[in-house]
Image: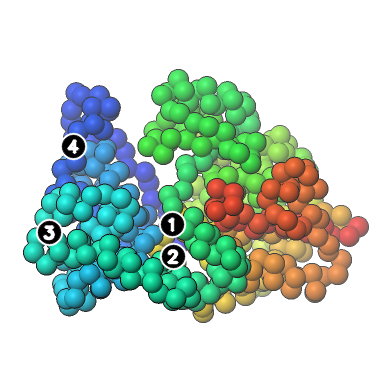
Amino acid sequence: MKKNPRPPARAPKSRREPPSSESEASRMARPLREDLVLQASLEAYGFIRHEGRLADRALDFTLRHKRNLYSNERRAVAERVYALLRRQLTVDFLLERAHRGFPRLDKTRQDVLRLAASRILHGEPIDAVARTSVLTGTDADALAALPEAARALEALPRDKRFPIAASLPDFLAAHFRAVFGDDAERAAEAMNERAPLAARVNGFKGSREQLRTLLEQQDVQSSPTPLSPLGLILDTRTNAFSLDAFRDGWFELQDEGSQLLGMLVDAPPTKVVDACAGAGGKTLQLAVQMKNRGDLHALDIEAWRIEELRKRARRAGVHNVRTLVIPPEGSEADEAIAPLEGKADRVLVDAPCSGTGTFRRKPDARYRLTPEMLADHVARQKRLLERFSQMVKPGGRLIYGTCSVLREENEQVVEDFLARHPDYSVRPVAEELGPELGAKVGPGPFLRLAPHLHGTDGFFGAILVRAK
């Protein structure tokens, strides 16, 4: 999902640590200064809930201005804020039943209770949370009453309980039921877990096992991704951007599902287009497939994303990428890509979408999405597929993908395209990935991934072949 109009947030730098001669391990072991952690958590969460800022940017802004926090405290702030966002509707339901006056409290007091309730919901002892949150009287009593409120939630009829327990707006809960059926509760629960930290090895530097050995030398533990042959799961405590292996271009952070979508392209060393390239995660993956040969055209509507792609390409040792900033809509966009019409062997359209497959990483996105926004996404996806299909040569392939789990953005968009383009047909993903892997990533002809089934973000992918 490539929608945000501003550059991505930068990872907090270690130089923001207070000066100390102690080792990183010693700093990580020291007790949290709970008053500072609470203050920072309240600020970040307030930016998100009350001012509408994106979660990653709100946290980055907050932590950049909290220079007195240590590594473990910064991590605690991020984890607590994200944990609350994943369970926001659940927490509000519980507190409204455990604390009769909760809706009338001022915002700050409400948010202190929300952060405390979320910690309890995630397994911390009630007494310890009340003490470290400095909650007394009726507020402390409300925390003690949370188990009873949780039983009241469990007693609700299933249809009423599901949106609250899953912390999904009602219209999204209905979509989850439509997509996952009896598995909807398990699918939503997996969306509310913390996502793994996945990396894709840069094949220009070496193999996955070589990268794993290199990371071990930097005291970073990792394990191979179970589906993608290109990935490693890193210890989530790792600041990957600070590693020598990252600065030297050995890997990019990329969800395993995104890696699998990139594998569907199978880019030959001829002419290939990444039509919604963003900051270039999949572009770099395609460059490796092409062995740095041929012409790899990376298009996007945002100049800052293209500039970030160029920086990443230099770090990765990629030389065959040609970048182009194109207009977002209209005849100007068509004119910008006209020189590529009918010339590409592969065109990847990793379309902007609702991001419903990435709720583990962007839990606040669910509260921003509306039915009207979803309809806008679908209309845009159809326009993009129509526009960029013009670049596919006879016999070439159009690969359509999203990080959504909703059929409206996936199968239905493909069906609409095929109905208007009888010269295209579906190539089953198992023919590209092999029967063993293909059977694991979807029972039908498409790539369809979900956290509760595959441990990846939610992704969809389709290979459409143009007749010769």
For the residues labelled 1 and 4, the Cα–Cα distance comes to 27 Å
Residue neighbourhood size for the residue with mark 1, other residues' Cα within 10 Å, grouped as few (<14), some (14–19), many (≥20)? many
Q: As shown in the figure, which amino acid type bears the numbered disc 4?
A: Pro
Disc 1 + disc 2, Cβ < 8 Å: yes
Q: Residue furthest right?
A: 468
Residue beneath disc 4: 31
The N terminus - image quarter: bottom right
Q: Earlier in the sequence, mark 1 or mark 4?
A: 4
Q: Nearer the viewer, residue 391 or 138?
A: 138
Q: Name the amino acid type tagged 1.
A: Asn
Secondary structure at badge 4 equals loop
| Mark nearer the N terminus (1 vs 2) | 2
Where is mark 2, residue-wise? Answer: 166
Say which label, 1 or 3, has the lower sequence index.
3
Residue type indicated by callout 2: Ala
Q: What's the residue type where badge 3 is placed?
A: Leu
Residue drawn at x 81%, y 48% is: 431
Looking at marks 2 and 4 on the same chain, the residue that comes earlier in the sequence is marked by 4
Q: Does the image show residue 236?
A: yes
